[in-house]
Image: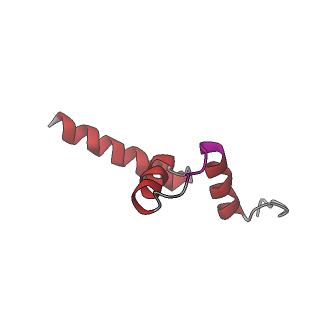
Amino acid sequence: MAADLGRAGQYLVQSLRLMVGVPDYGAYLRHMAATHPDQEPLSYEDFFRNRMDARYGGKGRIGRCC
């Protein structure tokens, strides 16, 4: 039962992070290991920058409030 609660807590944290736009580096690493074992995964910093660029339009884009 404790393991089930721990797992539920992990899913809750992951869901909340995704809702506010924080990318899941652990999921990315698991995906890379499972589907692209021949490629080296990005560092956390590069992964985070890549996800933010994808979400907000990348370099050279002028940020807007509205």
**Residue furthest to the top:** 2
Q: Toward which corner of the image does residue 35 lie, by quadrant?
A: bottom left
Q: Is residue 1 left or right of residue 23?
A: left
Q: Can residue 12 be found in the magenta stretch? A: no
Give the answer, above or below, for where 53 lies relative to 5.
below
Residue 42 position, x and y percent, is: 60, 50
Which residue range is magenta in the image?
Answer: 40-45
SS assignment for the magenta stretch, majority: loop
Asked whether 9 or 30 is in front, the reply is: 30
Specify the farthest residue to the front.
Answer: 38
Quadrant of the image for the N terminus? top left
Q: Residue at x 73, y 65 (%)?
A: 57
Q: How is the image coloured?
A: secondary structure
Say which quadrant the C terminus sits in.
bottom right
Q: Is residue 43 magenta?
A: yes
Observer-nearest of 14 and 30: 30
Q: Is residue 53 left or right of residue 38?
A: right
